[in-house]
Amino acid sequence: MRHPASYRDSAFLIRTPHRIEIPHSASSVKIPSVEPIRSVQWSPDGTSLRIIDQRRLPLDFVELDLKTVDEIRDAIATLAVRGAPAIGVAAAIGLVASLLEFESESPVLFRARLQAHAAVLSSARPTAVNLSWAMSRMTARANSALTTSTSELIAALRTEASDILTEDRAMCESIGAHGLQFVADGARILTHCNAGALATAGIGTALAPVYLAQRDGRHVSVFANETRPLLQGSRLTAWELSRAGIPVTILTDGMAASLMRAGEIDVVLVGADRVAANGDTANKIGTYAVAVAARHHGVPFYVCAPWSTIDRATPHGGAIAIEHRHADEVRFAGGGAIAPAGAAVRNPAFDITPAELITGVITDKGVYRAPYSFTYEMRSRD
């Protein structure tokens, strides 16, 4: 069966490591465990977006240097780079990289091209608010730049993208610091999908308190839901925690409730792709079921998200657009069919967890609790 090109290159969906087309330069290396994960960054020469190709993990570690707007949009759409904060950073750096070859254009033409490239990147994935947030911030910076020089405009955009990158790393540390109080020595943490270093430019969101607990000398362990259909939990979360020396156990997606019933889970930490004004949260499909089970068994359930993921313009979860992905992500695994060819498939990438099931939202600005009012002045302090 011939598969759509945009899904053909997924290492999990269809494992074809010898046929993957690597844009520009790529390197395959063994990573020393002492090195931090840099899932998204500038290339060393500053002309490209460098990402870890997460479609290839955990079998191969490959870095891609991307320059064109189509390459960068495709990397976001096919989950070569993923996680709401990471794709925001990737889009900001990628926007600049995609514009460098047009430095000789007039400022008027260049500004029009900037808007067009930003629109292309914003359309790559609709649910993660960080993507549109980053593009709005970059275009606002361009609009506020009082210059008639295209090269000066590019320099301003480069600075803005670098600021977004730096702020994201600091945001992760701040979320970790605010969330550390919920991760006691000996804590057994359940997480869903991947909201760690691979999903950000820093140490992650949901896994940031875990990394800080380890840094503090606390002995913690993590249960990672495998997270069907693309197994971001087993492929990515287990990979990055293992290399960091943090004990991790992979669960099938239907297993968590049984462990909660047995008293083996102390706290749930998950990430978010968008948090509405009332606290309703969009996250990887399956998060809602985990939240229901956690509430039933009295297990605290925390959402960890940067301030840029809080969408105060969206009143509730029902107003969040949910991305639906290709059916072949469900029909195929490891290069082979696991479902009848004619079977109907639903493949929403996200679900909505109602605010009433969320114990608290841990942000880089502090911990918020119901009733949710996401302002610095009105947040509930712990």
Image (spheres, grey):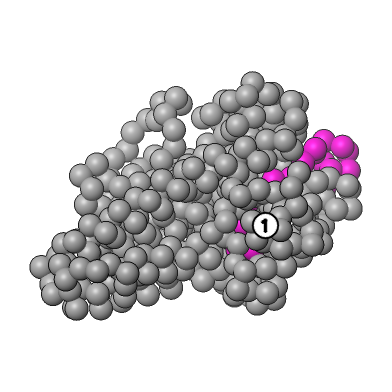
**Residue 195 appearing in the image:** yes
Residue bounds of the magenta highlight: 256-275
Q: Which residue is mark 1?
A: 377
Q: Is residue 294 left or right of residue 348?
A: right
Residue 181 falls in image quadrant = top right
Return the x and y of residue 67 as percentages of the image width and height: 25, 58
Q: Is residue 294 left or right of residue 151?
A: right
Q: Is residue 145 left or right of residue 216?
A: left
Point 89% across, 48% down: residue: 297
Viewport quadrant of the C terminus:
top right
Q: Secondary structure at mark 1?
A: loop
Residue count near mark 1 (Cα–Cα under 10 Å), binned few <14, some 14–19, many ≥20: few
Query: Eyeballing the image, is 88 above or below 30?
Result: below
Q: Amino acid at mark 1?
A: Glu
Viewport quadrant of the N terminus:
bottom left
Point 80% across, 37% down: residue: 266
Residue 196 falls in image quadrant = top right
The answer to which of 273 and 254 lies nearer the viewer is 273
Point 75% across, 26% down: residue: 186
The answer to which of 148 and 94 lies nearer the viewer is 148
User: How many numbered marks, from 0 up?
Assistant: 1
Return the x and y of residue 338 as percentages of the image width and height: 60, 59
Q: Is residue 114 left or right of residue 273?
A: left
The answer to which of 105 and 260 lies nearer the viewer is 105
Point 47% across, 65% down: residue: 133
Return the x and y of residue 352 as percentages of the image width and height: 70, 66
The answer to which of 191 and 132 lies nearer the viewer is 132
97 drawn magenta: no
Query: Eyeballing the image, is 230 above or below 280?
Result: above
**Residue 204 appearing in the image:** no
Return the x and y of residue 267 as percentages of the image width and height: 77, 41
260 drawn magenta: yes
